[in-house]
Amino acid sequence: MAEIKQVFVPDIGAYKDVSVIEVMVKAGDTLKAEDTLLTLETDKAAMDVPSPYAGVIKELNIKVGDKVSQGSLILTLETAADTQIPPSPPSSKGGTVTAPTTPPTAPKVQSLAPAAPTIPPLEKGGLGGISAHASPAIRRFARELGVDVSLVKGSGEKSRVTKDDVQNFVKAAINAPRGTAGGNGLQVLAMPVVDFAKFGAVEVKPLSRIKKISGANLHRNWVTIPHVTQFDEADISEMEAFRKELGAEYTKQNIKITPLAFMLKAAAAALQKYPDFNASLDASGENLVYKQYIHIGVAVDTPNGLMVPVLRDVDKKGVVQLAKELGEISARARELKITAADMQGGCFSISSLGGIGGTAFTPIINAPEVAILGVSKSSMKPIYKDGEFVPRLMLPLSLSYDHRVIDGAAAARFTAYLAKVLSDIRLLAV
């Protein structure tokens, strides 16, 4: 005989007013015992709340964004007799919690207004209308990538969604031809077509060939690589003093010793110490290719757009030789005399805006590289040293990296080491 039962938020410890971050069901859904109903998130953990009964949802009383506590009404369910699962101890450590059969003070069944729309478990054409099973950590990972976990087919035990499932879903969506995602891929709205002349006088100029080529590559890199940027500063007071002395010596040879020459040498030292930054993902995305050479690209601002010529074997050359080659290849780039071979084989890139200004920026990774260093304008700052504040020349560093290959701790170590080398150029000789 059918019964009407209420399902309440179970014992979640001392937490009150916990946020509902995901609702996996809607009114009319048929549930099995232990199907996940919703996910709650505290400041320390996320918790799945399963259904203690099998049955059909008659009324849903919770939506995403609600604040709930133990005993809050989740939904009303029409069940068959003897469908309750055996009670089990609840968990509030990021795992699954089991709803009690009754709340501490169960409210009476009453007719409520229809609940606000919730996230449906699946649209038609997905996985057969079955709510996705995934741990709170996997759900959080999917949200960070902008993926609706209910659209991901699980390969784990009992069809639970794994991290690999989410990553493979994203890869498939990225590689799918435009317009063929079938409603389950990552969709991008078309750019609006605007007649700007309606609002005033306009002038139309075609993009340069370089900007057309680089624009397409930059767009691909930005949307396919999960970028994160680590910011840091380097004390270059001693380096700058030495650079000026060195520059005076080589002026007669028409060699300009720029800060970028020192940065190239310091970056090569950092790449040797942290080889993950000198690697690339292979075509399958499952292997890292470690390079036994260090070629570094340098972004050059030309009248026709940005170009990135590559200096080879940076680790095997001195600062003066790097400065000479940098001046020559930059001049060829500005004169459009650079060849395609001059722009290939890079392991890492540096984009320096120090001669223009700015305090920080987020450079876009030059695939298939996995990191790029942005350099902004140095400035004098009061730095606390040896018990007092002293003026020091500080250089802002912005390291963008591919989060599929490099984690935050590694990026922080890389920039810290780079700053250390730049602050004490004697380390370049070690």
Image: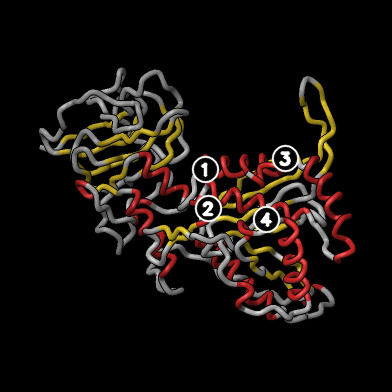
Q: Position of residue 15 (x, y in %)?
A: 42, 22
| Quarter that holds the N terminus | top left
Q: What is the CA distance from the residue labelled 1 to the residue labelled 3?
A: 20 Å
Instruction: Name the front one of labels 2 and 3.
Output: 3
Q: Give the crowd class for mark 3: few <14, some 14-19, many >=20 residues within 10 Å.
A: many
Is there CB contact under 8 Å for labels 4 and 3? no
Q: Is residue 20 above or below residue 168?
A: above
Instruction: Quadrant for residue 382, please give it.
Output: top right
Q: Secondary structure at mark 2?
A: helix
Taking the spot 80% from the left edge, 57% from the top edge, the residue there is: 257
Tag 1: amino acid? Ala
- Callouts 2 and 1 close, C-beta under 8 Å: yes
Coordinates of residue 110 in the picture (x, y in percent): 32, 31
Mark yes or no: residue 32 visible.
Answer: yes
Q: Are marks 1 and 4 in contact (CB under 8 Å)?
A: no
Height in image: 44 above or below 260?
above
Q: Is residue 327 left or right of residue 161?
A: right
**Which residue in the protein does label 3 denote?**
423
The quadrant of the picture occupied by the C terminus is top right
The one of 344 and 28 positioned closer to us in this rendering: 344
Q: What type is the residue that disc 4 sits on?
A: Leu
Please count the marks in the image. Answer: 4
| Residue 395 x/y as whole percent | 75, 44
Counting residues from the N terminus, which is met first, the one under dot 1 or under dot 4? 4
**Badges 1 and 3: C-beta atoms under 8 Å apart?**
no
Secondary structure state at the residue bearing disc 3:
helix
Label 2: which residue? 277
Q: Is residue 115 visible?
A: no
Q: Earlier in the sequence, mark 4 or mark 3?
A: 4
Label 2 Cα neighbours within 10 Å, binned few <14 / some 14-19 / many ≥20: many
The residue carrying mark 1 is 410
